[in-house]
Amino acid sequence: LEIMPPPATPTADSISVITTPTFVSSSASNNNNNAFDQVMTFCDLELCVAIDFTKGNGDPNVPGTSHYRSNNNLNDYQWTMTTVVETLAAYSERNEYSVWGFGGQYNGQDQPIFLCGQSAKARGTGGILSAYEATFQTEIAFGSSRKLDTIIAAAAQHARKSLAGAEQHDRRSYTVLLV
């Protein structure tokens, strides 16, 4: 799957549909000797962030909406991304993450998936937040289609690619999709 910067529209030919994705979730505690920490010494943790740009989240210029951006406080998306990334970062060697948007419109066309920011990967929490903010500097309009199948397929493909790379080094890989 090739995810292009906006306003490129993925075509059916550019998306591989994965029919049997597997999702694994775990939680980490502060105990440095827990089973999760032991397993993660042999695993690479990948994170894909998918941000909903549909109309249901409200106008980003209106206080109280999910995307409202204020100089003083993090909005719901910023807070969630910060909390999750800072929790999982301890288990990520590269600290680089895919950041995608969905449900937005460019040139009046719904976009099932698009790149947030200018790079395929964002570095750390700051990079994710910058990619999110950069999306508002584009000609995005909030759309009405909230289809997740393309996002799930992209994350599943990312997970398979990461696993294949990890297996070359006798490691495993777990991919988390944050929507």
Image (cartoon, grey):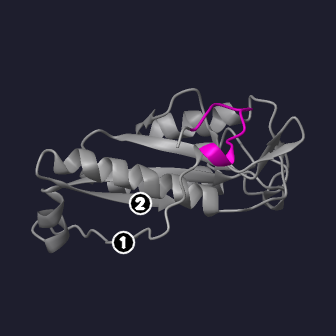
Nearer-N-terminus badge (1/2): 1
What secondary structure do most residues of the magenta stretch adopt? loop
Q: Going by the image, does 70 lie left or right of 161? A: right
- Amino acid identity at mark 1: Ser
Q: In this view, does 48 lie above or below 146?
A: above
Q: Residue at x 59, y 43 (%)?
A: 14
Query: In the picture provided, is 173 more to the left or to the right than 129?
Result: left
Q: Where is residue 17 in the image (x, y as percent from the top left)?
A: 54, 59
Question: Does the image show residue 179?
Answer: no
Mark 2, other Cα within 10 Å: few <14 / some 14–19 / many ≥20: some
Q: Where is residue 39 in the image (x, y as percent from the top left)?
A: 15, 65
User: Which of these two is toward me, 172 or 71?
Assistant: 172
Identify the residue at image location x=31%, y=72%: 26
Q: Which residue is drawn at 74% across and 35% down?
A: 136
Question: Which mark identifies residue 177?
Answer: none
Residue 138: image quadrant is: top right
- Crowd class of label 1 (few under 14; some 14 to 19; many from 20; radius 10 Å): few
- Left or right of 172 on screen, residue 18: right
- Decide: is 19 above or below 150: below
Range of the magenta residues? 3-13
Magenta stretch contains residue 23: no
Q: Is 144 placed above or below 114 here?
A: below
User: How many numbered discs sit on the rendered protein?
Assistant: 2
Which residue is label 1 attached to? 25
Residue drawn at x 33%, y 40% is 95
Contact (CB < 8 A) between labels 1 and 2? Answer: yes
Viewer-proximal residue, 124 or 104?
104
Magenta stretch: residue 10 in it?
Answer: yes
| Mark linked to residue 176 | 2
